[in-house]
C-alpha cells in the first residue's frame, strides 16, 4: 500500500481510538502488522510514536486549563492538592508514578514482542482488550460520580495504571478513566484528568521511542503526515466525546464503549 495512505490510516486510527476504551496502541499496532507486514516489535514502537499527535490534540483542546495549571505552580510547594493546585499536583505525581511502572513495562514489552509470532501477538492484544472492556464495564456499574478534585491516592493509582497501559491492548484512557470513576469522580472530571495526563505520558513515550530506535518503520514525510492526521482527528474526537458526556449520562457512555471494548477484544482474539 502507498506509504502516504498507510500514514493517513494509522493517524486516523490513533486520533479516534486514543480517547475511547479500545486500545489505540493495540489498534494501530495491529493495523501496522496487517497492512505493512512489519514485526510486532516495530508495529508497537510505531504505535507509541504516534501518541505524540494526540498529545498535541489534548494540549490544544485543554490549552486554557493547561495555562491555569502552570499559573498555579508558584503555590504548589505550600499547598499541594489544595483546590487551586490539585490538577498540577495530580499531573506531577501521576506522571512520576507512570515512569515507575511504565519504563519497566516498556523494556519487558520490547523483549516480549520481539519473540512473538504474528498470531500470538494478535492473541495477546485481543486478550488485553477483553480485560480492558470488562474493567470499563465494571467501573461504569460502580461509579458514584461525586468528586471533582483529585488527591494523592488518585494520582498514585492512576499514574501507576497508566504506566502499565504501555502494553498493546490495554487502553490508557479506558484504564485511567475507570480508575477515576471507581475513586468516585464524576464522568466529565474523569475524562478531563485522564486526557490532561495523556499529554506528558504520550510525549515521554514518543521521546523514549525516538531515543531508542529513531522514527520507527516509516519515512520522515509519512511520519509527519501520520502525526498531523492523528492531531487533527484527535482534536475533533475528544471534543465530540466531551460534548457527548455533557448530554448523555456517563454510565451509558461507559457501558457502550465498554461493550465495544469487549467486542473488539473478542473479534481480535478470534
Image (cartoon, helix red, strand yellow):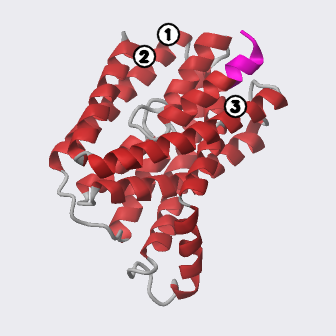
Q: Which mark's residue is nearer the viewer, 3 or 2?
A: 3
In the picture shown, does residue 192 fall above or below 178?
below
Q: Where's the N terminus, which quadrant?
A: top right
Q: Provide residue 224's location: percent of width, then percent of height.
A: 77, 35
Label 1–label 2 contact, CB within 8 A: yes
In the picture shown, does residue 72 fall above or below 207?
below
User: Of residues 258 and 249, which is closer to you in this image?
Assistant: 249
Element at badge 2? Answer: helix
> Residues under labels 1 and 2: Cα distance?
6 Å
Q: Provide residue 73's location: percent of width, then percent of height.
A: 57, 80
**Residue drawn at (48%, 14%), measured in percent from left and top?**
120
Q: Provide residue 195's location: percent of width, then percent of height.
A: 47, 52
Give the left or right position of residue 209, taking residue 71 as reference.
Answer: right
Q: Where's the C terminus, which quadrant?
A: top left
Q: Earlier in the sequence, mark 3 or mark 1?
A: 1
The part of the chain drawn in magenta is 1-7
Is residue 118 among what the camera can see? yes
**Residue drawn at (44%, 87%), measured in percent from left and top?**
79
Element at badge 3? Answer: helix
**Which mark identifies residue 226?**
3
**Which mark identifies residue 149?**
none
Q: Which residue lies under the disc numbered 2?
A: 123
Label 3 Cα neighbours within 10 Å, binned few <14 / some 14-19 / many ≥20: many
User: Of residues 192 and 136, which is closer to you in this image?
Assistant: 192
Q: Which residue lies under the disc numbered 1?
A: 119
Label 1 Cα neighbours within 10 Å, binned few <14 / some 14-19 / many ≥20: few
Amino acid at each position: 500500500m502507498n506509504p502516504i495512505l498507510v500514514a493517513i490510516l494509522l493517524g486516523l486510527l490513533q486520533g479516534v481510538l486514543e480517547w475511547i476504551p479500545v486500545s489505540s496502541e493495540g489498534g494501530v499496532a495491529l493495523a501496522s502488522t496487517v497492512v505493512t507486514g512489519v514485526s510486532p516489535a516495530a508495529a508497537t514502537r510505531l504505535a507509541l510514536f504516534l501518541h505524540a499527535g494526540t498529545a498535541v490534540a489534548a494540549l490544544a483542546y485543554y490549552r486554557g486549563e493547561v495555562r491555569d495549571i502552570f499559573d498555579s505552580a508558584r503555590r504548589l510547594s505550600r499547598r499541594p492538592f489544595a483546590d487551586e493546585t490539585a490538577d498540577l499536583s495530580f499531573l506531577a505525581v501521576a506522571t512520576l508514578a507512570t515512569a515507575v511502572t511504565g519504563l519497566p513495562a516498556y523494556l519487558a514489552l520490547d523483549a516480549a514482542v520481539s519473540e512473538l509470532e504474528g498470531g500470538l501477538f494478535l492473541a495477546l492484544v485481543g486478550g488485553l482488550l477483553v480485560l480492558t472492556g470488562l474493567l470499563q464495564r465494571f467501573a461504569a456499574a460502580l461509579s458514584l460520580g461525586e468528586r471533582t478534585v483529585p488527591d494523592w491516592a488518585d494520582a498514585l493509582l492512576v499514574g501507576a495504571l497508566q504506566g502499565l497501559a504501555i502494553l498493546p491492548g490495554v487502553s490508557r484512557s479506558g484504564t485511567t478513566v475507570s480508575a477515576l470513576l471507581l475513586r468516585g469522580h464524576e464522568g466529565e472530571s474523569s475524562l478531563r484528568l485522564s486526557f490532561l495526563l495523556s499529554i506528558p505520558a504520550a510525549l515521554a513515550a514518543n521521546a523514549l521511542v525516538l531515543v531508542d530506535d529513531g522514527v520507527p518503520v516509516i519515512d520522515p514525510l509519512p511520519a509527519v503526515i501520520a502525526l498531523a492526521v492523528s492531531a487533527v482527528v484527535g482534536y475533533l474526537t475528544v471534543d465530540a466525546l466531551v460534548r457527548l458526556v455533557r448530554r448523555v449520562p456517563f454510565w451509558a457512555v461507559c457501558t457502550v464503549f465498554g461493550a465495544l471494548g469487549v467486542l473488539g477484544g473478542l473479534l481480535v482474539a478470534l
